[in-house]
Image (spheres, rainbow, N blue to C red):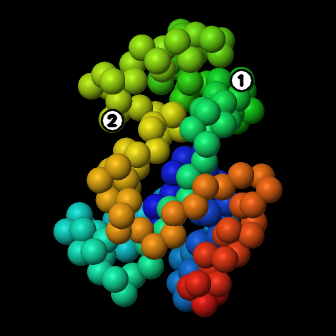
Amino acid sequence: FCYIEKVGCQSFNKLFRNLRSNYESSQRTEQIWFLNTPSKHRLQKRDLERILVDKTWHKAVFFRDPLERFLSGYRSKCEGYHPDGKEHCRGHFGYAGKNFAGAVKWTVQNLDSDFLSEHDAHFKPMGLFCGGLDQTLDFYDTVEQLDLTTSRQKVQSFLSKLGL
């Protein structure tokens, strides 16, 4: 599963933590972040590359409209909706993030820069997640855009495909 920041990532982390807690007691915690990273399961890059092309593994990624995701990230991180938000905003936009217009201008100016791969995960282009979705998307079995009206049904359908 490839999760992308600002695409239901908190909900997906909770979902997979709860599902895995049936098999691993270490998952029975209030903590949700970084419990199911490849390194936690002792997977290395070569393991992930093998899994990516292995048709017996179901690979899934959900994405969001890029403009909607950017606005959500800005509101979450730059307008103070989350306690750690200002750190993310300042670290990513610098003073350009003081207002939305400045953040948009900064993003447009830096879209093709070498800095692109170092973006804060909340603003990083979705194609750069999971080792480069722009190169690996064809290997995914489930690729779905989430929005408010269809996300529940799409996630339930995905889980059903997995027998969950």
Locate residue 88 relative to residue 58 in the image: left or right. Answer: right
Residue with the mark numbered 2: 117
Residue 57 vertical position relative to residue 30 in the rendered view, above or below: below
Give the percent coordinates (x, y) of residue 39. Answer: 34, 65
Identify the mark nearer the N-term, 1 or 2: 1
Locate residue 39 relative to residue 96 in the image: left or right. Answer: left
Locate residue 34 relative to residue 113 in the image: left or right. Answer: right
- Residue at point 39% right, 19% down? 110
Q: What element carries label 1?
A: loop
Quadrant hosting residue 16? bottom right
Give the percent coordinates (x, y) of residue 130. Answer: 38, 55
- Residue at point 51% right, 63% down? 143
Give the percent coordinates (x, y) of residue 58. Answer: 44, 79
The amino acid beneath tag 1 is: Glu
Count of marks, rendered view: 2
Quadrant hosting residue 100? top right
- In the depicted view, which residue is nearer to us: 140 or 86? 140
The amino acid beneath tag 2 is: Ser
Quadrant location, the C terminus: bottom right
- Residue at point 48% right, 20% down? 107
Residue 52 vertical position relative to residue 94 in the rendered view, above or below: below
Residue 134 appearing in the image: yes
Quadrant hosting residue 51? bottom left
Tell me if mark 2 has few (under 14), some (14-19) or many (20+) residues whose alpha carbon lies within 10 angstroms of its own: few
The residues bearing labels 1 and 2 have C-alpha atoms spaced at a distance of 24 Å
Tell me if mark 1 has few (under 14), some (14-19) or many (20+) residues whose alpha carbon lies within 10 angstroms of its own: some
Residue with the mark numbered 1: 79
- In the depicted view, which residue is nearer to us: 88 or 107? 107
Residue 126 vertical position relative to residue 142 in the rendered view, above or below: above
Q: Do the residues labelled 1 and 2 touch (CB within 8 Å)?
A: no
- Residue at point 37% right, 53% down? 133
Q: What element carries label 2?
A: helix
